[in-house]
Amino acid sequence: MMSNSSVDAANKAGIKTSCENHEKCMRMIQAILDGEATEEEKNHFRDNMDVCMPCINEYHLVKCIKESLCNRLERKTCPENLINTIKLKLDLL
Amino acid sequence: MPVAMSKIVKEESTDDQRYHIFNKEFLPHIDSMYNFAFRLTMDEDDAHDLVQDTYLKAFRFISSFEQGTNAKAWLFRILKNSFINDYRKRSKEPAKVDYQEIETTYNSEEGGEVQQTVDLRAHTVQDMIGDEVANALNSLPVDFRTVIIICDIEGFTYEEMAKILDIPIGTVRSRLHRARNLLKEKLKNYATSMGYDT
């Protein structure tokens, strides 16, 4: 939720503080961040994303979640004994 | 990959050729496969068995693999199907969500302009440690967890995801969107309970 001071600052800067198409915009933002957006979606993003505060916030939130999932989760290494077991069982097939 | 550039492993391939493909194209993905299996089962022993079953199936059905195509996606598809057919039935996860029902409900809501905004800020997520994000991910129903894993952690394209999951690309988009909204809700709840400024 935006604070009153944030709303005032956004209004003064000509930035929308509510989005009438937010559900549609969320799907477009997802496609942009996943590298799956169409040219039309990319153009719409370029033309509109710096004038709508809910969409700007959504973009940064989804981007941050994606980066956290990609970079901060523990990646396990497959145990060596599992690799050896698989190779041994292949010989029995 | 154009058909001309790919090559189906022939039934009459020699053992040496099959082992060569297995070692060169399949084994390099074993860490990703193990992580995927672990995030699906949330149990190291089950992940161990699931990866082993998947690789043995991959070798057994190597004649249906087209060399030069995406081996990682092919292996992920086998693992996902093995999980559904063999492991999910005896999974320790107590409650299963009928994701098709959720998607139907969700899609039917689209026409009603229902907005699913979660009041959560990026900096709150930035403050979280990896384990907290992992806990939120692990708390999602497995079908939603799966799309996030293969998209955000493993980096598959929507087209590859559609093939792995046997669903249309439109459903990939919808399921991913729904999964991310659920993840935001989990992160928001977790952040609130931990006293983060959301």
Image: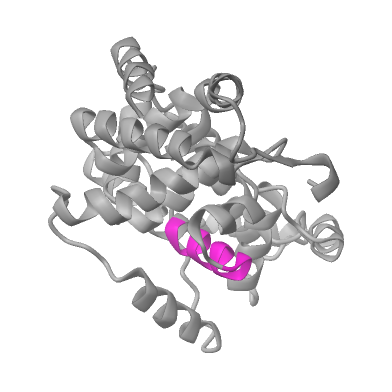
Is residue B170 magenta-colored?
A: yes
Where is residue A11, by image quadrant?
Answer: bottom right
Is residue B160 magenta-colored?
A: no
Left or right, residue A22 beside residue A76:
right
Height in image: B172 above or below A6? Answer: below
Where is residue B185, by image quadrant?
Answer: bottom left
Height in image: B86 above or below B167? Answer: above
- Look at the image and tell me in which quarter the C terminus of chain A lies: top left
Q: At x 46% / y 69%, what residue is drawn?
A: B116
Height in image: B119 above or below B80? Answer: below
Asked if residue B2 can be seen in this view, the reply is: no
In the foreground, A14 or B47: B47
Instruction: Please tell me how many numbered marks the rendered image carries.
Output: 0
In the foreground, B188 or B35: B35
Left or right, residue B153 beside residue B168:
left
Left or right, residue A26 beside residue B142:
right
Place of residue A3 in the rendered image (x, y in percent of width and height, measured from the top left): 50, 55
Q: Which stretch appears magenta?
A: B168-179
In the foreground, A44 or B98: B98
Identify the image's colour scheme: rainbow, by chain, secondary structure or one colour: one colour
Asked if residue B48 can be seen in this view, the reply is: yes
Place of residue B117 in the rendered image (x, y in percent of width and height, measured from the top left): 47, 65
Q: Main secondary structure of the magenta part?
A: helix
Place of residue B47 in the rendered image (x, y in percent of width and height, measured from the top left): 28, 33
In the foreground, B149 or A23: B149
Q: At x 82% / y 57%, what residue is drawn?
A: A42
- Toward the front, the furthest residue is B12
Place of residue B182 in the rendered image (x, y in percent of width and height, measured from the top left): 38, 58
Q: At x 48% / y 42%, what residue is drawn?
A: B61
